[in-house]
Image: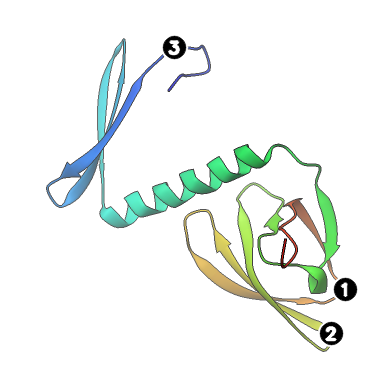
Amino acid sequence: MTDEHGDGGILEVAPAGAEVGITVAVPSGEHTFLCTPARARELAAALALAAEEAESGPADPVTVRAGELRRGDVRDGDRAMTVEAVRVDGGTAHVTWTSGAGRGWNQMYDADASLPLRRRGRPPGA
């Protein structure tokens, strides 16, 4: 891994008793952080999401109607929110979201409400 100046470092992850140890070693020194297994899984999910977004490249934000959201759409904002499912019932769109940390929740919108997306998911069958 490299930092913003191009300096190299090593990241190691290993069990540390009942916790997970994350060690960052750079030429100037070494730091070890401990976290719970649950927090380690959240970190892994956030890393996987960031990697997926980096691989898909930058995209111009787009705005879509809530009723037209599809699985994989990523909401534009300071935190990544990805659409897991959408169900339209009359004039209401019921959207299931997941965060980069793997948390999920449901939210209702007027089906015609405009929502800004950072990235559009793939259409079914694509």
Residue type, mark 2 in image? Gly
Query: Residue at label 3?
Result: 7
Query: Residue at label 2?
Result: 91
Residue 90 versus residue 104 in the image, above or below: below
The quarter of the picture where residue 33 lies is top left
Residue type, mark 3 in image? Asp
| Viewport quadrant of the N terminus | top left
Q: Position of residue 35 (x, y in %)?
A: 27, 46
| Viewport quadrant of the C terminus | bottom right
Which residue ends up furthest to the bottom in the rendered image?
A: 90
For the residue labelled by badge 2, is the local secondary structure a helix, a strand or a loop?
loop
Are circles 1 and 2 on residues that touch, CB within 8 Å? yes
Tell me, for residue 25, which label it has, or none. Answer: none
Sort mark 2 into few (<14), some (14-19) or many (20+) by Cα contacts within 10 Å: few
- Horizontal side, residue 26 vs residue 100: left or right: left
Tell me, for residue 112, which label it has, or none. Answer: 1
Residue sitting at 18 percent across and 44 percent down? Answer: 15
Q: Position of residue 124 (x, y in %)?
A: 72, 68
For the residue labelled by badge 1, is the local secondary structure a helix, a strand or a loop?
loop
